[in-house]
Image (cartoon, rainbow, N blue to C red):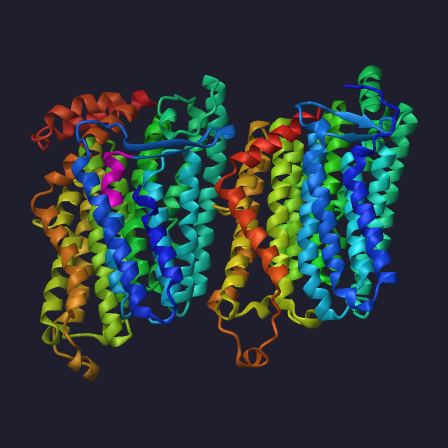
Amino acid sequence: MEQVMSSIHLSAIAPELILVVCSLLILLIQSFAPIRLRGYYGYVSLIGVIGAVAVVLTQPQSFELRAIAYSFNDMWVVDNYCRFFKLIFLLGTGLTILISIKYLDNEAMQHGEYYALIIFATLGMMIMASGIELITIFLGVELMSISLYVLAGYTRTRMVSNEAALKYFLLGSFATCFLLYGITLIYGSTGTTRIPAIAKFIAGAGFGRPTIVMGMALLVIGFGFKTASVPFHMWAPDVYEGAPAPVTAFMSAGPKAAAFAAFVRIFMEALPSLQTNWTMLIWVMAALTMSVGNVIALVQTNIKRMLAYSSIAHAGYVLVAFLSAGEQGITSILYYMLAYTFMNIGAFAVITVLAGKGEQRVQIDDFKGLGYRHPVAALAMSLFLFSLAGIPPTGGFMGKFYIFSAAVKEGFVGLAIIGVINSVVSVYYYLRVTVFMYMQTPDAATEREEPAVAFSPALVIAIFISVYGVLSLGLFPAPYVAMVKQSFLTLL
Amino acid sequence: MITYLPLAGILVICMIDSKRLQLIRWVAFGTAVVTFLVSLPLYFMFDNGTWEMQFVEDVPWVSQFAIHYHMGIDGISLLLVLLTTFLTALAILSTWTAVTERVKGYMVSLLFLETGMIGVFCALDFVLFYVFWEVMLIPMYFIIGIWGGPRRIYAAVKFFIYTMSGSVLMLVAILVLYFMHFKATGTYTFDILDYYNLGLPGNIQMWLFLAFFVAFAIKVPMFPFHTWLPDAHVEAPTAGSVILAGVLLKMGIYGFLRFCLPIFPQATINFVPIVLALSVVGIIYGAMVSIAQDDIKKLVAYSSVSHLGYCMLGMFALNTDGLKGSMIQMINHGLSTGALFLIVGMLYERRHTRLISEYGGIMKVMPAFAALFLLVALSSMGVPGLNGFVGELLILIGAFKSSLGYGLVATIGLILGAVYLLWMYKRVMYGQITKAENQGLKDMTGREYAYLLPIVLFIVWIGVYPKPFLKTMDASVDHLLEMVNPQTTAHLDGAKPSWLNNVFARVDLQQVAKGQGR
């Protein structure tokens, strides 16, 4: 596996380069081009994203099975695994941009930085997925996180948004320290930060160094924070609630997937021999994450906050898959993250449509009668919610099915039972939204101040893509499963 | 196959402007009728001589997991599919004037539901079955929640969550089975038929049986899992109740027949006493609660609990008569209770109340209605010559063969059944007209005849000449019993006509057989 190539392969980082150029271009246009081009930043960034997708799809070295191309002195890897994750990130980014264009118009905040930051964050995620060395991964984490801190506070005139950004920044940098400290400990005991070398060292030296185990535990904390797993989830509800709706959509999908991408790579490739140590830890975390997320979501009245807790719960399901390790477990993570990206961003797209200027309407009550005012949007929303609840024939069901089958296969039947019971709990709060949409008539007051709900072609396209994704993942999963299986082969 | 015809109807309806109510109704009804007509030939082309699946379709769906799109029907599911298509068409016809708001969504939900129901009865792949099983919940949830009565939201959410909590455990059990099958044979498969010969160890069978048992028992619903049923039935609109009673409840029974009995024969035999006891409790309890109701619809709803107790009793008697009785009783219950709900719906449309005390002397103003109502009520309580008798007789024969005590108690249930139905009928139909509003009630309209008479036709037909219905299930039932309990079937088959003479002898034998099973 280890072929040392000291040369620099620009083709290996071509998608990332495209994104860099694209975001710099946006910043330049903003500074030098006439003001009437203001509306076009979004489309420029979209073109960049599409270009990156095209390059990821055609990166030649990874088409053969098990072909792994290292470059930049073994700091960078392009394999099917990271390509799949990059596609998820770019998908999330693309959908977010489609949602954002109209939103920013509404808020009169159509600035280039927004798109530049989103693309920088995406860049960070892609570095996390491609890094095969702890410091590179850490750089990716930082680039992503810092962009997100700024984005969370983007609507700077709104109090909650500022609060979200500050909270996110303080807690986030604290958690990053844990991550870095973990990396340090591992480096100190193995003498390397390169993942294959660490694996080799641990396998060779045998088990027994407490510093490695400590390093592992600290990494769990760091990634636990990034994936919003209990008990490191406290930031999520406030940040999700305060951040602008499209940013929340973005945060809940891509960065979570990126954190899992790096998490899985480090633990499966570098520390597989410590599996006995982490099994119990992750077991408890998964059970807690699912239960706490779902139970607290039951009582939320703000839909963004509710989805924040639901997203915590979903991290718990993914942890179940993580725990199951092995082929089935890892591939189910890939599948689930893809489905989750579609359904969650889709749901936030509908919320963005409804929220209106200044996000006045983000209470679940505000969904009253939506089914009759905007039947199509409500139908799409119901589909996303049913998918999040894991009811067939949607991608969410297939994803859960995949995850729980992995868990049962590896003998975690108890955890699988906790998981399915949790999905029954979750049905209640997802259904509550449909109850409001279809079964309650709005009060006369809300009816009268009929909001200027703003659809735009870009938004409709985003919702449509999400609907298509959710349905095709649920009805015709075979090609996607083939894809994730292939992506897995390069790992391990 | 016919499963997807309703979906085509949905597409057409979606394209119609939602203002044109009449057109939407006709298209929906047309779709349902066409589906029924297309499903009819299944009966005539059906080969009664074999227990094997027929009209099979089998293509890989998700090949990586060995999930197949595997559909087919046998003697157990054939009549249920026909019942589904038949009742859906009538249910749609019954909503003409009952539902006037959001007609489009209503019709779409009903047709979508039909697809789900047929899918459940035809699916021969675990995952496919599960998908249809859950998909069905969504339209039913909306039907209850949007077009239901005052407490509809509570009822809809309760229905959804209750059913779902049962079925997720089933999902885990399915997955466990899947990997156990792999361990035993080295191949991955979700094909239900492949599991019939698996032969699992006893204690694992017990746990898996329990998981499936809870899922299906909730759906049936067996005592004590029945609490969602009265809520859902009472709040649902008429067509919803008809389909709920007529078809959805049958899925629990069907699940037992398709999964629990053949896959976990050992556990089935171990659980016989518990299931029989619960069934008998359900029969008596359902009947007693029915007597106490002052709301007609609630009365009919609780009578379902009682009737489905019979189905369970017959099935877990584990002999040919009991099983056949149980299956024919499923059809009967679908027809009679469906008809009862339609009748309650007619009364409700006229008076907008379901309280028994609001009626009285209705026979004077609605004589034709009274006659049909009486016929349906008699069929529901199992009067000879009508369909209920055939089913209940077979079930009781089966029950007596299996255990004298349960048989006796179940017979008491029959009497109670007569009590609540006749008493309700008396209070509603006979006597003087006590309320002025009831003076001017119109008798049945042509449309109402159109949806009630076909059911009555079948009620009488099954009652007088049940053979065409029974013969389709012979081969399947025999095969099923062979799988569950080889010893008893071999002995019981020959001696069917003179059952009374050897009841006691056979009871002993059964006990012996059970002892060996343990």
Residue B15 pos. (x, y %): 39, 61
User: Is residue B299 among what the camera can see?
Assistant: no
Asked if residue A401 lies in the magenta stretch, the reply is no
A158 relative position to A96: left or right:
right
Near-viewer residue (B443 or B263): B443
Q: Is residue B324 above or below residue A235?
A: above
Quadrant location, the N terminus of chain A: top right
What type of secondary structure mainly makes up the magenta span?
helix
When asked about the image quadrant of residue A105, the answer is bottom right
For the view shown, which residue lies furthest in the front direction? A34
Residue A223 pos. (x, y %): 77, 41
Near-viewer residue (B229 or B202): B229
Quadrant location, the C terminus of chain A: top right
Q: Residue at x 40, y 60 (%)?
A: B14
Q: Residue at x 16, y 53 (%)?
A: B381
A148 relative position to B107: left or right:
right
Near-viewer residue (B419 or A140): A140
Residue A115 pos. (x, y %): 78, 56
Q: Residue at x 37, y 58 (%)?
A: B108
For the view shown, which residue lies furthest in the top direction? A204
Q: Residue at x 57, y 31 (%)?
A: A482
Q: In the rendered structure, which segment of residues is drawn in magenta?
A: B73-82
Near-viewer residue (B316 or A34): A34
